[in-house]
Image (cartoon, rainbow, N blue to C red):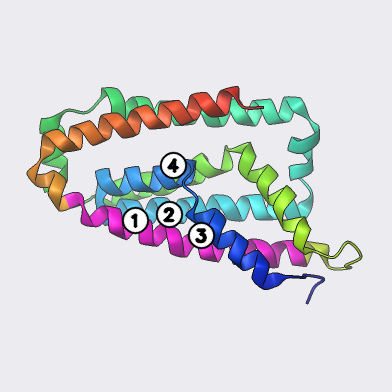
Amino acid sequence: MLGIHNYWLFILSGILLNLTPGQDTMYILGRSLTGGLHAGVASALGISVGSIFHTLAAAAGLSVLLATSPLAFTAVKLCGATYLIYLGARLLFTRSAASAAAELGAAPARGGARAAFGQGILTNVLNPKVALFFLAFLPQFITPASSSKTLAFLALGATFITTGVIWSLVLAVAAARLRSFFVRNPNVRTLIDRATGGLFMLLGARLAWSR
């Protein structure tokens, strides 16, 4: 089928990779805890849209640019790191227990979900490691002599994104269920905001210094 081999091994590998905690996982958990189910689901879908972008880029060969051009890789990496640090700083420095309690007591706004969706896309798209992952991982399951490499890339990418969406939605729902606990304990919510913000800033710094 399209020159794809060991498809079930690919699915298993993709599921295990999705289960491995990373930058996207922490973003979904953070948005679900702070914004509720709508924000959590929106962030998961935003991450998935970012993955679609990377799949299309890899299929078109654009990801090769990041793999071969240190300047392009560095530029995208610094943009992604800056954005993560910005998100972290907002959580770390602009919240208080009182404002968190008021926000949690209210129903999540549509604007919050839209923001979570857009931020999820940017968080994923501006991570060059995701682009390189698609470029390095997917070809291992495509026969070199295949005449349908582009379609094979798209099929494998769609499979990986599907398993990722399922796991991301599970994370969002599970984290959102804890939201009522933070309604009753706003000081704990503030600590979670600080911890999440610090983690985002740490991930941004790690991305900036990565090679």
Q: Residues in magenta?
A: 152-179
Q: Which mark is residue 172?
A: 1
Q: Quadrant of the N terminus?
A: bottom right
Up-down relation of residue 83 to residue 170 (above or below): above
The residue at which mark 2 appears reads as: 44
Q: Which mark is residue 164?
A: 3
- The answer to which of marks 2 and 4 sits earlier in the sequence is 2
Q: Position of residue 63 (x, y in %)?
A: 74, 44
**Label 1 crowd bin: few (<14), some (14–19), many (20+), radius 10 Å:** many
Q: Magenta region's main secondary structure?
A: helix
Q: Position of residue 161 (x, y in %)?
A: 56, 61
- In which image quadrant can residue 90 be found? top left
Up-down relation of residue 2 to residue 48 (above or below): below
The residue at which mark 4 appears reads as: 119
Q: Position of residue 199 (x, y in %)?
A: 39, 31
In this picture, residue 113 sits left or right of residue 73: left
Dot 2 falls on a residue whose secondary structure is helix
